[in-house]
Amino acid sequence: MLQLLAHVRSLLVNCFGQFALDSKPDKPQYSALDCLFHIQRAPGIQVVQKSSVIKFENVGLRYGMGPEILRDLSFEIAPGSFQFLTGPSGAGKSSLLRLLFLSLNPTRGLINVFGKDASSLGREALPAIRRSIGIVFQDFRLLDHLTTFENVALPLRVRGKEEASYRKDVIELLSWVGLSDRINVFPPVLSGGEKQRAAIARALINQPKLLLADEPTGNLDPSLARRLLRLFAELNRSGTSVVIATHDLDLMDQFQARRLVLNEGRLQIYD
């Protein structure tokens, strides 16, 4: 430990001058690049570099023998980032979300997810990777015979978890999305906005690193749409990467975020 502290002291002086340790200014001996070189190689010091959550390289997609509906997509989703995915109807937004969720394989190109080549993932590894990706479907996909609580807890039940181990987490999550008084209600009784929030809670129950949402505000009035956007923004501030597919320009104008624009199978990115 003493050796490490001495090495760090030396680096501080050489990189920033003696003023790094006291009030007497002194000229640094190392350039910025030299500092980076020495710090990366300092004993006991690790420089952590965040890799992409998901990275696409020249990805193309076609269904059957038809034409390519997605062409040469190259982009990445950074940790803790927020982006809108937009474009005209039929542009391929839902197909791109399925590629991001790994429920669809590309016709060509490479997809890297959490530092792993998606094409090399076996059947055993794929479910674990998908648990790190939450998805909110446009049509909610709630089961009518299950209560709100049971719908949200379903991903944990499928994994064999006991209710006692997750009950508190589910209740807290439902409270966060504003459904604490609808826990024991069945989906047919819920409003459209309540169903959407229940679907969001279900997508978050596994604490994903990436959340995908397909037209989450498409059937909601503007006030509810803004409320949902605030939920997504709060989630993003906690560190989760968010991708929202939408054609609602007014909604996108309310939040400063990166835009991924699909048109005729190709992607343009506006940071």
Image: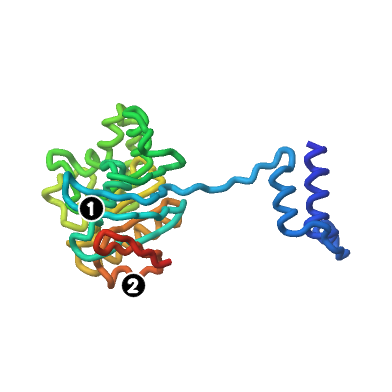
Observer-nearest of 79 and 88: 88
Quadrant assignment, res 15: bottom right
Observer-nearest of 118 and 207: 118
**Between tags 1 and 2, which lies in front?**
1
* Number of callouts: 2
The quadrant of the rendering that contains the N terminus is top right
Mark sitting on residue 68: 1
The CA span between labels 1 and 2 is 31 Å
* Residue for badge 2: 253
Does any portion of residue 181 appear in the rendered image?
Answer: no
The quadrant of the rendering that contains the C terminus is bottom left
Mark sitting on residue 27: none
| Residue at disc 1, secondary structure | strand
Which of marks 2 and 1 precedes in the sequence?
1
Specify the amino acid type for callout 1: Glu
Quadrant assignment, res 121: top left
| Residue at disc 2, secondary structure | helix
